[in-house]
C-alpha cells in the first residue's frame, strides 16, 4: 500500500490536538490499564471494503486512489484513479494470506514493550485524548513507537507516532466507522538520497458486508491477445 511503510518506514501525525489546561486531572496508570484491556478485547472486521487515496510528494509526485476488498488474509486491490484520471478498467492485484497493515491491534503499542510516560490531556473535538510518550523497554530497535494518544471515550488509540531512524518518522490516526475502530489517515516522511520524500494516505468509504462473492479474489487475467489484422 504505502511504499514507505512497506519498506519499514514510520508514519507521522501532523498534529494531535490542542493542549487542555493543566487542571484537567487524570490517573495515567488507570488510563493505560483500561486502554490495554480494551485493545485486548477489540473485535476487528474480518470482511470489509475501503478506499484510500495515496499522495506522494518530494522526490516524486503521484496521486492514486485504490479500492480494497478483504476477507481474512485475502485482499483485492483495485487502482481506480491515477493523477486525477479515472481508470476505464482498474488495475487489479490479488493477495493471499496478506496481513492488514493498518489493523488497530497491529499498531497499538503495549506496556510489555514500552514505558508509557504521561505527557498530558489534549482536546480532540468535544472530548479529551490522553497522550503518552513511549520509551522502549528493550534495546532500541530500528522501528519503534514514539507516542500514542488514547481516546478518552473509547480508550482506544486515536493516533500513534513512530520512527524507524532519525531520518524517518510518521503516524496513523484512527476513529470509529460503523461499529468498528479503523484507520482514517496515515503519512510518512523520509530523507532519501534525492531529498525528502512524503506520502499521505486518506481512508474513506468504509463498508462492512457480511460476505463478499468468491469471484472477488479470482486471479485477475489479462485480456487475450488478438491475432494481427490481415494486411
Image (spheres, helix red, strand yellow):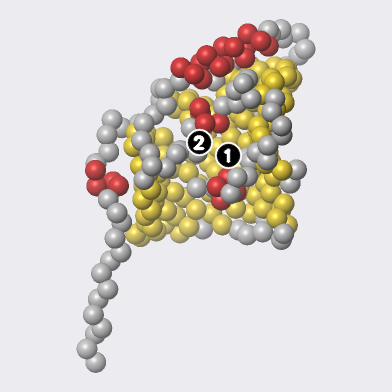
Can you tell which quarter of the image residue 92 is in?
A: bottom left
Residue beneath label 1, please?
186
Judge from the rendering whether residue 131 lies leftward or rightward of residue 173; answer left or right.
Answer: right
Task: Tell me which numbered mark, 1 or 2, is placed earlier along the sequence.
Answer: 2
Can you tell which quarter of the image residue 10 is in?
A: top right
Judge from the rendering whether residue 16 lies leftward or rightward of residue 178; answer left or right.
Answer: right
Q: Secondary structure at mark 2?
A: loop
**Badge nearest the viewer, 1 or 2:** 2
> Horizontal and vertical percent for residue 196?
71, 53
Q: Quadrant where the C terminus lies? A: bottom left
Judge from the rendering whether residue 81 lies leftward or rightward of residue 116; answer left or right.
Answer: left
The dot on residue 102 is: 2
Identify the residue shown where x is 48% and y is 32%.
Answer: 103
Identify the residue shown where x is 36% and y is 35%.
Answer: 72
**In the figure, 150 relative to 106: above or below?**
above
Judge from the rendering whether residue 44 lies leftward or rightward of residue 5; answer left or right.
Answer: left
Q: Nearer the viewer, residue 162 or 67?
A: 162
Q: Nearer the viewer, residue 62 or 102?
A: 102
> Horizontal and vertical percent for residue 28?
68, 11
Can you tell which quarter of the image residue 161 is in?
A: top right
User: How far is disc 1 from disc 2 in space, using C-alphas?
Assistant: 9 Å
Amino acid at each position: 500500500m504505502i511504499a514507505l511503510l512497506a519498506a519499514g518506514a514510520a508514519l507521522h501525525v501532523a498534529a494531535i490536538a490542542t493542549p487542555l489546561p493543566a487542571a484537567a486531572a487524570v490517573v495515567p496508570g488507570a488510563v493505560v490499564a483500561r486502554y490495554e484491556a480494551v485493545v485486548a478485547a477489540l473485535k476487528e472486521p474480518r470482511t470489509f471494503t475501503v478506499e484510500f487515496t495515496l499522495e506522494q510528494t518530494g522526490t516524486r509526485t503521484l496521486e492514486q486512489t485504490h479500492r480494497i476488498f478483504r476477507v481474512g488474509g485475502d485482499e483485492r486491490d483495485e487502482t481506480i484513479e491515477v493523477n486525477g484520471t479515472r481508470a476505464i478498467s482498474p488495475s487489479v492485484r490479488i493477495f493471499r494470506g496478506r496481513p492488514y497493515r493498518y489493523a488497530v491491534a497491529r499498531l497499538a503499542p503495549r506496556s510489555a514493550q514500552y514505558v508509557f510516560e504521561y505527557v498530558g490531556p489534549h482536546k480532540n473535538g468535544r472530548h479529551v485524548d490522553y497522550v503518552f510518550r513511549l520509551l522502549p523497554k528493550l534495546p532500541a530497535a530500528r522501528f519503534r513507537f514514539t507516542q500514542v494518544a488514547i481516546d478518552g471515550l473509547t480508550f482506544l488509540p486515536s493516533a500513534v507516532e513512530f520512527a524507524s531512524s532519525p531520518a524517518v518518522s510518521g503516524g496513523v490516526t484512527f476513529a470509529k466507522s460503523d461499529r468498528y475502530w479503523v484507520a482514517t489517515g496515515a503519512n510518512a516522511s523520509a530523507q532519501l538520497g534525492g531529498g525528502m520524500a512524503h506520502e499521505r494516505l486518506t481512508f474513506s468509504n468504509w463498508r462492512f458486508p457480511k460476505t463478499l462473492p468468491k469471484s472477488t479474489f479470482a486471479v485477475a487475467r489479462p485480456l487475450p491477445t488478438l491475432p494481427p489484422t490481415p494486411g
